[in-house]
Image (tube, helix red, strand yellow):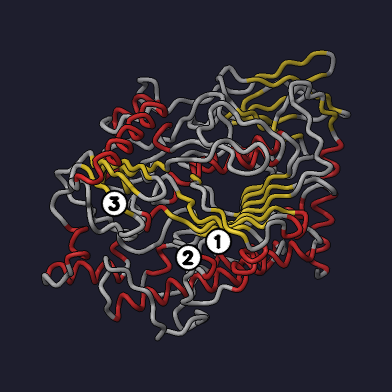
Amino acid sequence: MNNTKLSYRQHFLWVLLFYVSGLHAIEASTVKHDLSDQPNILWLVVEDMSPIIEAYGDKTIKTPTITELANEGVTFTNVYSPSGVCAPSRAAIAMGMYPSSFGANNMRTTSNTKETGLPKYEAIPHANAKMLSQYLREAGYYTTNNLKTDYQFKAPKGAWDENGPYAHWRNRKIGQPFYAVVNFTTTHESGLFEPYGFRKIESRHYFSDNRKKIAKLPQHHAVKSSEANTPVHVAKDLDFPIPPYLPDTPLVRRDFWKMYNNLAETDKQIAAVLKQLKDDGLYDNTIIMFYSDHGGPLPRQKRLVYDSGLKVPFIIRYPNGEHAGTKDDQLVSFVDFAPTLLRLAGIDKPTHMQGRNFLGKQQTAKREYIHAAADRFDGFTDVIRAVKNKRFKYIRNYRPEQGYYLPVAYREKIPTMQELLRLRDADRLTQAQALWFRDKKDPEELFDLINDPHEINNIIDDPRYKKVVTELSAEMDRWLNEINDDPSLPEAQLIQRLWAGNESQPVTAKPQFKISNGIIHISSPTPGAVISYQLGNITPPELWQLYKGPFKLDQATSVKAVAHRIGFSESDSVIYDPDKIIYSQY
């Protein structure tokens, strides 16, 4: 570690120590956990990637870092996102809930207002619902997220100890366990756009916790290297595995090269992060989880409820390589991540979470089914629901009168999408490739994923599978009723339901202070509001403390607080100053 980095870290920890020691928490309402033997938890999250790696049988390229994780860990072979696009998927992970159960399934809720005529809104879960990171923070974990959020709602300030490009486990207190999420966006769909180049912001992974170097990077992912300055990790003439729903042309093969080259670069970025973990002596006291936020970036992958859009790689490396080199074929949904992680940390599953614990001695019954949904994508709306077991997938199309293909402008920047449209217009697509461009959809679909992994042949009318259709259709009805998902509800009415009939997004009521015998109590009239606060000049401006209960100050200092219920607008901040009056800060 160079002197600049060491100097900054010492300064940061000194400020943090001073900040923590400036108050005595009396948090009687908070459950205390013994964290002395709790493992650290590191999530390595890539974007837009199907299981196209060695551990899943794809030998196209070498991914030494990910392969090493698989060799030292457990490879899960049946893990699925509930959506084929990022924001709903990340909402499911953050809350442990199906996105269509709390208004999080339309991509995105805060954009495309001109095309849809809808206002911006945020998903609103039950008032008692908290983010996974907040539960872990309340239990004593140091929680960090670097860099992407995209939850379909704004995270409360207190949900993370650190959230941003500088977030790092190295800023925690000595001996404190951490939950760190590191996001890698190089494999994102936009990495296929022309002109080709890596996202420059991803270089932060190579810079460890060096804030000066990270600060010099672009702050937006759209800034990329030129093609001439982009490292080539993968030969351009490899025999790439083109699925039958895409044409095998030079343009498509170039996109496949970009996809695998981006994966190879991401593997190097992951190696840089794991090196930091090893340098800190934490590699064998950390549960490492590697996964993608949904399936692949190509047309007829991302945004769809086929396995190409939902199925992801998922690898867990346990401390000291426990269960090394094994495979687990149980069905796992993203909604299972949060309750499972909480159980690993010794925390009971909150009542609002709809997933199940799939690990350890307290593992609940294994899943029989995976569920998924597709609604609006940018400016275009469809309504699709899906349920699958290990062999069959049943799909119900609520808008059979419209085709599968939606002219999403973002996707049409991909050369492969342009090639598909060119060949469609020239009537040169194969039967498998033309399926996506049908004018209408079948109201119901059934696919045998063992014999038809690309989901080309709809066997819904085959009498041999009548019992399968009956079973999966009944399971879909049960699931929709359980999570209160009404696919026929227009998005405008969904917004009104979330807003309880009001014309605008609800606003969290401002925090209120109560001082009793030198003890400060902070509350908000809004049920479910998360209160975050800072202590005068003690708290670094980018950090917020999560209010867990009343506390007493060792010295006279001001307290700045905000309240924020998930899905509501954040309240105005309020400052308590013992030398002045309490006033609002707008």
Residue 390 is situated, as x and y percent measured from the top left of the image, at 41, 49
* Left or right side of 14 for 408: left
Amino acid tagged 3: Phe
For the point 23% across and 38% down, the residue is 398
Tell me, yes or no, whether the two marked residues, 3 and 1, touch with CB atoms within 8 Å. no
> Which three-letter amino acid code belongs to the residue tagged 2?
Thr
- Give how far apart the Cα atoms at labels 2 and 1 are: 8 Å
Query: What residue is at 30 percent from the left and 44 percent from the top?
Result: 394
SS for callout 3: strand
The type of residue carrying mark 1 is Phe
The quarter of the rendered structure image containing the N terminus is: bottom right
Task: Locate residue 526: give its quadrant.
Answer: top right
Q: In terms of depth relative to the viewer, which is nearer, 243 or 97?
A: 243
Q: How busy is the neighbourhood of tag 3: few (under 14 within 10 Å), some, or many (20 plus)?
A: many
Q: Secondary structure at mark 2?
A: loop
In the depicted structure, whether residue 365 falls above or below residue 391: above
Residue designated by label 3: 447
Q: Residue at x 19, y 59 (%)?
A: 435
Look at 44% across and 80% down and name the residue there.
Answer: 227
- Res. 155 visible in picture: yes
Could you classify mark 2 by the number of other residues whose Cα lies within 10 Å: few (under 14), some (14-19), or many (20 or more)? Answer: many
> What residue does disc 2 label?
187
Q: Position of residue 161 (x, y in %)?
A: 69, 43
Q: Mark 1 — residue? A: 184
Percent coordinates x, y for residue 108 in the rendering: 38, 45
The mark that comes first in sequence, 3 or 1, is: 1
